[in-house]
Image: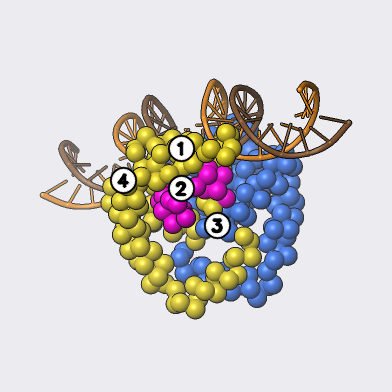
Chain colours: A blue, B yellow, C orange, D brown
Amino acid sequence: MRARERLLAAIEADLKAAGMPPLAWYDVLWELARSHDCKLRPYEIEERTLLAQYNLSRLIDRLEREGLVRREVFAKDGRGRWVVITDAGRRLRERMWTVYVRSIETHIGCKLAETEAKTIARLLERFL
Amino acid sequence: MRARERLLAAIEADLKAAGMPPLAWYDVLWELARSHDCKLRPYEIEERTLLAQYNLSRLIDRLEREGLVRREVFAKDGRGRWVVITDAGRRLRERMWTVYVRSIETHIGCKLAETEAKTIARLLERFL
DNA sequence: TGATGGTAGATGTAAATGCATCTAATATCG
DNA sequence: CGATATTAGATGCATTTACATCTACCATCA
């Protein structure tokens, strides 16, 4: 819990210092960018990011307001929506990644050997 | 990050189901209860819990409003305060612990062997 | 001593979150 | 078919958090 607190604070600070939005934006944009058609249903984003439904709904509002994603109708089910990443969204994600990857290397990579990182991942994935 | 998300959600849910306040309250009460004189300076709580200063200040407001802690003057430095845990605070912490410990056992203990838990702790403490 | 800078903690305001609930659409089953 | 239940996502409202700044006090040093 504490390690996560420290690391997240450091990474968020790096993003902010580079004039970037919060990490949660990255997570959503990344899930969209790597998805099959660059679009996902809100509930799929929810599952992948573990964001709460009502938080995600509003986060999508913000992303949409910034032109990073677009909501489209989901024809097969009138209740559903597609969330589609835009070119601007894709570009922002890439720019965020250059900051993020450096941050990961600085705060995490240099403190863990490959095998150690794998060990942590193996043990922690039991909780998922 | 995800493991923490899942675990914290589960633990918070257990606390809430038992009619208890959030885990952050526990953390503060616990730091106070185990401190030398059952009192700490706000900045000490901040260091131990990693809560942000402005969040802690308001969390202490809430705890004080509930009669769980008391703010007292810190004679040696007029800028400082003592935060003192009250009997009610101590009792609440104990009641929270009975829920919390069960929650830890349910969600964590049964999924990790002692040595595995120690491995995680050893690796993650590099970030602290 | 008194100007300057730093520290401890509080707080106004804006933004985000949590909770409960709502709307609209679909699924189920008599 | 029609009533009822369920699901996807949005939203009103209260609480909490973030950011910036403030107040009060202390430390330093010319």
**SS state under label 4:** helix
Asked if C7 appears above or below B120 in the picture, the reply is: above
Distance (Cα) linking label 2 and label 3: 22 Å
Residue A117: quadrant of the picture: bottom right
Q: Which residue is mark 3?
A: A2
Q: Which residue is mark 4?
A: B88
Q: What residue is rendered at 58% in x and 74% in y?
A: A119
Mark 1: which amino acid? Glu
- Mark 3 chain: A
Distance (Cα) linking label 4 and label 3: 27 Å
**SS state under label 1:** strand
Q: Which residue is mark 2?
A: B39
Circles 2 and 1, Cβ within 8 Å, touching? The answer is yes
Q: What residue is rendered at 46% in x and 48% in y?
A: B39
Could you say which disc has been placed on residue B72 in the image?
A: 1
Query: Residues at marks 2 and 1, common chain?
Result: yes
Q: Nearer the viewer, residue A103 or B79?
A: B79
